[in-house]
Image: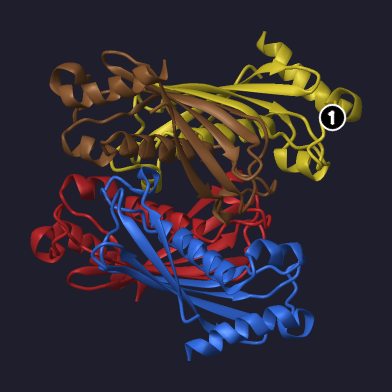
Chain colours: A red, B brown, C yellow, D blue
């Protein structure tokens, strides 16, 4: 899987008085993007947490090209752009679905930690997960 | 304490494309109201949770009189309007601070539960907490 | 159309430290419910606003039966439960999709207003809209 | 003014099931930071919009060092770190107020636009605003 694509509709709640989507909401869409990416890849983030693996965000970045607007159908395209021993990175594109216009691009970096927020190595402790992520990451290259 | 009063400023994020505050945000303000009420009464909700008592919401109600707007200073007035063996109710008024105009009124009902969401009786299990809540509730009558 | 049914997935952002969905988010789901109801009925809320009709919320009510949880697929069932000269009411059920377990029920009341928040009569000013809403409301009875 | 400091308390709504503040909320705090910075500098963002100047976000970036937690008092430190003909940049630090522990750092870049989202030059069209921003920016250097 090079990338995963997921479609959502912009809600009223996400807009602000400028008439466009408030900028922090793109980070919520990034969350939806990586969640659906992982589900598609064969593991849900929910299962990961049940097995004691958490992916808190270390860094987020977003460039806003065109404003998303109320009731737009948007497409979130997600890919793994980094896979290190204790870190994983995702990159995202937000597009207006019908016109394919690019609305925003961004990325997030996450660490693999246990319930006590201590770094863990998925390669050692969850080899199956690691294999899965690695496979998807390598296909991308 | 008959009621507790707390002031906040409306943020851009809370507005929507109608140019006014989105209706679900009043419930977030109610949360701030009851949190500060309890702090003022002598116990923080954070401490309650640390002692294993949670107050999930059973019911919420809000009437919207006048729209709150960006950068308004608003006042949240909170009081306990119900105190039963395993339930507590709060009522709220949202006012524009300078004009004292009433923007909204509402209330929430909560159950006392433990970490497994099982009902508990604060009167039996946390007599000090019960005394404190009872005292504030009785003053109101 | 007696009622309209729409399915969404619970995101991480919607949860709180109690491990369940924060109570104000149900009002965001209600918004999605009535938006999709109207789209299904043949008119989008976006178009309504473009024609100068707005539906600000006058009242909201929600009863929380069972907590919604992260990654749950939930179903929002929406129906029109009130249709007066200048007001419209919607009622909602939130269910866990697979088990059909009832998570919450609620309702909202809205006024028909113009861009200056002055009440308008859709029956007089937008007879087509009124006919559409009336038809759906009557079917319900 | 080198920088402006503003204090807020973390709400329950801002936490997620990991027990810490959800990452998109830092961008909402950045908004509060720059709003209060401008108010302190002598102009409110609300007035800016009333005069037809808007500052949509072009870019956001945040590094998360330590998680903010429920009921924490946090301090937002804001400064202008960029001032170009049609752009302005703010940088932010989020600190736990009592311990001064650094929780996050970030920045945002904004364009100056009119109501139709067309770029405008504040230096030419709002010389008073420009002077004010310039003065604060220069002090920083």
Residues packed near mark 1 inside 10 Å, few (<14), some (14 to 19) or many (20 plus): some
| Residue D109 in view (yes/no) | yes
Residue sitting at x 70%, y 67%? D48
Residue sitting at x 41%, y 66%? D76
Question: Circle 1 sits in a helix, a strand or a loop, which is it?
Answer: loop
Q: Quadrant of residue D13?
A: top left
Residue sitting at x 47%, y 82%? D2
Q: Pointer 1: what residue?
A: C120
Q: Nearer the viewer, residue C71 or D129?
A: D129
Subunit ID for the residue under disc 1: C
Residue at the extreme top of the image, as rendered: C141
| Residue C101 in view (yes/no) | no
Where residue C135 sits: x, y (%)? Answer: 76, 17
**B87 up-or-down from A49: above or below:** above
Where residue C84 sits: x, y (%)? Answer: 76, 17
Where residue C107 sits: x, y (%)? Answer: 57, 22
**C44 up-or-down from D63: above or below:** above
Q: Quadrant of residue D132?
A: bottom right
Residue at the extreme left of the image, as rendered: A124
Residue sitting at x 48%, y 87%? D140
Q: In the shown orientation, is residue A108 left or right of residue D112?
A: left
């Amino acid at each position: 899987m090079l990338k995963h694509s997921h479609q959502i509709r912009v809600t009223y709640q996400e807009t602000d008085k400028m008439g466009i989507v408030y900028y922090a909401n793109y980070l919520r869409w990034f969350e939806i993007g990586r969640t659906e990416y992982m589900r598609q890849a064969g593991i849900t983030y929910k299962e990961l947490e049940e097995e004691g693996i958490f992916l808190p965000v270390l860094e987020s970045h977003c460039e806003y090209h065109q404003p998303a607007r109320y009731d737009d159908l948007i497409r979130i395209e997600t890919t793994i752009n980094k896979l290190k021993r204790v870190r994983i990175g995702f990159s995202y594109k937000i597009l207006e679905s019908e016109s394919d216009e690019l609305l925003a691009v961004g990325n997030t970096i996450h660490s693999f930690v246990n319930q006590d927020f201590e770094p863990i190595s998925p390669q050692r402790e969850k080899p199956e997960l690691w294999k899965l992520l690695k496979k998807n990451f390598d296909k991308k290259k």
